[in-house]
């Protein structure tokens, strides 16, 4: 994929992508005939074996019953790259492949970073909800501190590479080699890298080697070939052992796993692999999971082991994506600036009747988990950003959940003693607030967390806090709408393809990744026959 804008030619009326796909036909189509129907053949070849965990859309919650919303941050981007693969191959994505938060967080936004030494800056903004104008959308954004490449500490990296037979395709091992070569070319003398490979067994191709020995590192990558079964568990054990043996105090310690996730010998169960990753995560060796391929891809396993292994998860479907991860965002890819990052929103019942968090379905936490430092949460790299959207029903507006009057006035308040002047002034000030944002996180090698708090007030809603904020907001909303359309969301019945694309066109700017996404939106619209 190298295009950056424009529109793709429309499909002829007789070949409207997956308008004729098997699921639309209402019955099973014989396998031996799929070669005679190109759209069905492409769907079977390109997506038939991919595995995803189910996603259940979260309903609205009433503030009087659930005043707090708590979740783990997520800087993964794999879902968007997988979506791009599907649409550009003319395959309608399975709704379970669509994780809206990963789509939104794929893109750059101009959120200002912290200026006071804090790990994060936070930015909140409210807008009218485009699919229900009685509702509002609140964008919650956090921006991690940025670290220049020359300030990045010494790195201890282990490349863990799947060389099994399933990796033979051009978009798998050959692309893995090009991805890692991009990273290896940027290593410095103080950086070290080891290479572990696995197929039916696991072995160390290159012991921990200085980044100054680029020729040796590149040669070790280039000679790799695919073949055999897949014992990923053994590879994970060896990679972490080497990473721990070469641990750099205060440095970057990371395993970079490149695979299609098709583990078929040794430890193969996702639960066992997750337990293995949880145990290894205690060593403060972080994880990057990079997925490759389509058709026999285990997204479910990759997402779970990255979530539980102090990891991030991306999908590499092209050299362009490899460059984005390994060149443009290298500091964020390698360097964790905070771990176990949790967000908790407390809604003011005088302002908000009910709410729902869009996306993050598998990142939800119990309210009490926010203050529990033993509860695992997401990691964030240098310069990374996290965006979350809440759809809220203001008090006094009809909407999901119980009527607003019942939430605000339905319960008789107990008799209370008269308030003092200070208490009255404080109550008036609190009535001007929509919500309280709390962020809890740990330093990369710490065991105890710290907390930051931010308030969204009535008078701050109409003002832009930084240049280009409106464009960023409109783009994030457009991408969320796109995800909801692909999910066939029942909670956004008023959503519209044309309005979504129009908003995206107005906020695309000169960002090549946004322009590419606009093409994908237009292609998806044609595939859905809209």
Image: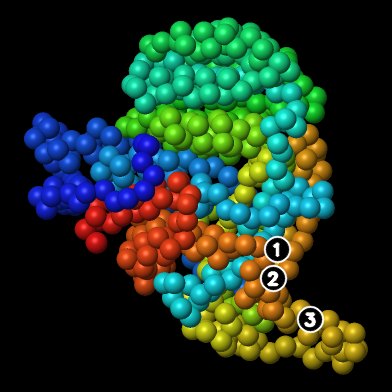
Precedes in sequence: disc 1 or disc 2:
1
Where disc 2 sits, the SS reads strand
Specify few, some or many for label 3: CA neighbours under 10 Å numbering under 14, 14-19, or 20 or more: few
Residue at 59 percent of width and 63 percent of height: 469
Taking depth in this image into account, of 290 and 191 the one nearest to the observer is 191
Which residue is label 2 attached to?
Answer: 456
Residue 498's place in the image compared with 239, above or below, is: below
Other-residue count near label 1 (Cα within 10 Å), few / some / many at <14 / 14–19 / ≥20: many
- Residue 169 shown left or right of residue 390 in the figure: left
Residue 445 place in picture, x, y as percent = 78, 34
Query: Can residue 5 be seen?
Result: yes
> What whole-number distance in Å separates the C-alpha atoms at marks 1 and 2?
8 Å
Quarter of the figure that contains the C terminus: bottom left
Q: Quadrant of the N terminus?
A: top left
Q: Residue at x 41, y 72 (%)?
A: 131
Residue that appears at 70% across and 43% down: 146
User: Quick check: marks 1 and 2 in contact, CB under 8 Å?
Assistant: yes
On screen, residue 468 versus residue 318, left or right, reads: right
């Amino acid at each position: 994929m190298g295009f950056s804008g424009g529109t793709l030619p429309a499909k002829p009326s007789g070949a409207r992508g997956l308008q004729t796909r098997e699921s639309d036909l209402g019955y099973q189509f014989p396998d031996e005939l799929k070669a005679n129907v190109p759209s069905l053949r492409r769907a079977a070849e390109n997506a038939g074996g991919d595995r995803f965990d189910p996603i259940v859309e979260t309903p609205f919650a009433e503030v009087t019953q659930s005043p707090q919303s708590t979740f783990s941050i997520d800087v993964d981007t794999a879902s968007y790259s997988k979506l791009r693969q599907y649409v550009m191959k003319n395959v309608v994505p399975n709704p379970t492949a669509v994780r809206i938060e990963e789509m939104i967080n794929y893109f750059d936004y101009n959120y200002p970073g912290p200026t006071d030494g804090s790990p994060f800056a936070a930015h909140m903004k409210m807008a009218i909800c485009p699919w229900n104008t009685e509702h509002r959308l609140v964008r919650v954004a956090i921006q991690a501190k940025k670290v220049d490449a020359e300030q990045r500490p010494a790195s201890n990296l282990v490349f863990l590479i799947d060389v099994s037979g399933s990796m033979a395709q051009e978009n798998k091992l050959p692309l893995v080699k090009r991805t890692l070569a991009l990273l290896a070319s940027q290593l410095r003398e103080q950086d070290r890298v080891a290479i572990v490979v696995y197929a039916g067994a696991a072995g160390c191709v290159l012991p921990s080697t200085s980044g100054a020995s680029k020729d040796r590192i590149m040669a070790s990558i280039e000679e790799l070939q695919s073949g055999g079964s897949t014992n990923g568990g053994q590879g994970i054990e060896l990679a972490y052992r080497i990473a721990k043996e070469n641990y750099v105090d205060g440095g970057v310690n990371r395993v970079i796993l490149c695979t299609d996730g098709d583990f078929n010998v040794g430890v193969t169960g996702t639960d066992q692999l997750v337990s293995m990753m949880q145990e290894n995560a205690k060593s403060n060796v972080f994880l990057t999971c990079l997925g490759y391929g389509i058709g026999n891809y285990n997204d479910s396993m990759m997402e779970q082991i990255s979530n539980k292994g102090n990891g991030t998860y991306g999908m590499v479907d092209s050299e362009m994506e490899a460059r984005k991860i390994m060149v443009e965002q290298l500091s964020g890819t390698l360097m964790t600036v905070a771990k176990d990052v949790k967000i908790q929103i407390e809604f003011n019942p005088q302002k908000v009747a009910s709410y729902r968090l869009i996306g993050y379905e598998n990142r939800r936490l119990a309210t009490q988990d926010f203050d529990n430092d033993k509860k695992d949460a997401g990691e964030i790299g240098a310069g990374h950003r996290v965006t979350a959207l809440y759809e809220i029903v203001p008090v006094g507006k009809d909407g999901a959940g119980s009527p607003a009057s019942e939430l605000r006035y339905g319960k008789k308040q107990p008799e209370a003693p008269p308030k003092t002047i200070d208490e009255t002034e404080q109550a008036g000030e609190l009535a001007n607030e929509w919500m309280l944002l709390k962020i809890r996180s740990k330093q990369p090698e710490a065991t105890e967390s710290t907390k930051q708090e931010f308030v969204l007030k009535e008078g701050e809603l109409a003002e832009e806090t930084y240049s280009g904020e409106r464009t960023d907001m409109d783009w994030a909303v457009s991408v969320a709408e796109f995800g909801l359309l692909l999910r066939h969301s029942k909670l956004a019945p008023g959503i519209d393809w044309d309005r979504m694309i129009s908003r995206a066109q107005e906020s695309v700017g000169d960002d090549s990744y946004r322009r590419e996404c606009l093409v994908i939106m237009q292609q998806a619209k044609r595939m859905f026959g809209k």
